[in-house]
Image: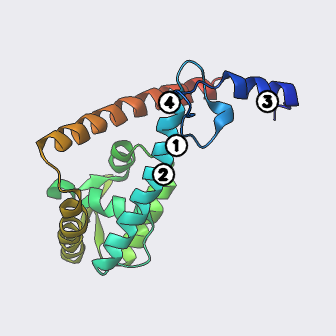
Amino acid sequence: MIAMTKNATQEIRNDVPTRGATEPIVSSAHLVSPKSAEMSEFEFGLIVAGNAFHRWVVHCMSAAGLKDLTPLDVLVLHHVTHRARNKRLADICFIMNVEDTHLINYSLKKLQNLGVVVSSKSGKDVTYSSTDSGLDYVNRYRAIRESCLINALNANDGLNRDIGELARLLRLLSGIYDQAARSAASL
């Protein structure tokens, strides 16, 4: 832990870039860089949006009839159902960008116990797929998503383009964060 003097803390605050009379909207002002206050604003937005998204997927799946799932459980069920192809644990982790395979494995076991995912063995590989029951829940989720989220969004072509661009930027930044994590891990 780095000890900071009152003067050092004040220097950081004085170094925070501002836009006119307003400061950037951030969760950790001490992390704002004069090189990119926007990155701190993005991180705060990501925190808020990530938590809202997690709350949304859990409530949507609960409304679809599958209760007591974590956000990761819901996302794993959606990925296992994606394109109706069997998925290996390693592939699920890779696509979802989750390093800790035990987290995905725990979700898969939970989903299997609920009867919405099934595993099968093909040679050495164990693969996972959605059951008919799982597919029914996912289809109900889709209908609720359409009604509650997509209809509320009321997106026109311009907004849909902006959302597509934001998705591209999020994928780009995830690569930058992954590289930064590798760099930090090597220190």
Assign a secondary structure to mark 2.
Answer: helix
Assign a secondary structure to mark 4.
Answer: helix
Assign a secondary structure to mark 1.
Answer: helix
Q: Is residue 93 left or right of residue 163?
A: right
Instruction: Return the residue found at the far front.
Output: 21
What residue is at 45 percent from the left and 46 percent from the top? 98
Q: CA distance from mark 4 to mark 3?
A: 20 Å
Q: Amino acid at mark 1?
A: Phe
Q: CA distance from mark 2 to mark 1?
A: 6 Å
Q: Pointers 2 and 3 in contact (CB under 8 A)?
A: no
x, y percent for residue 164: 22, 39
Whichever of labels 4 and 3 marks the residue nearer the N terminus, that label is 3
Provide the residue designation for mark 2. Answer: 48
Whichever of labels 1 and 4 marks the residue nearer the N terminus, that label is 4
Whichever of labels 2 and 3 marks the residue nearer the N terminus, that label is 3
**Tag shown at residue 9:** 3
Q: Is residue 157 left or right of residue 48?
A: left
Q: Nearest to the eye among marks 4 and 3: give it.
A: 3
Q: Pointers 2 and 1 in contact (CB under 8 A)?
A: yes
Q: Amino acid at mark 4?
A: Met
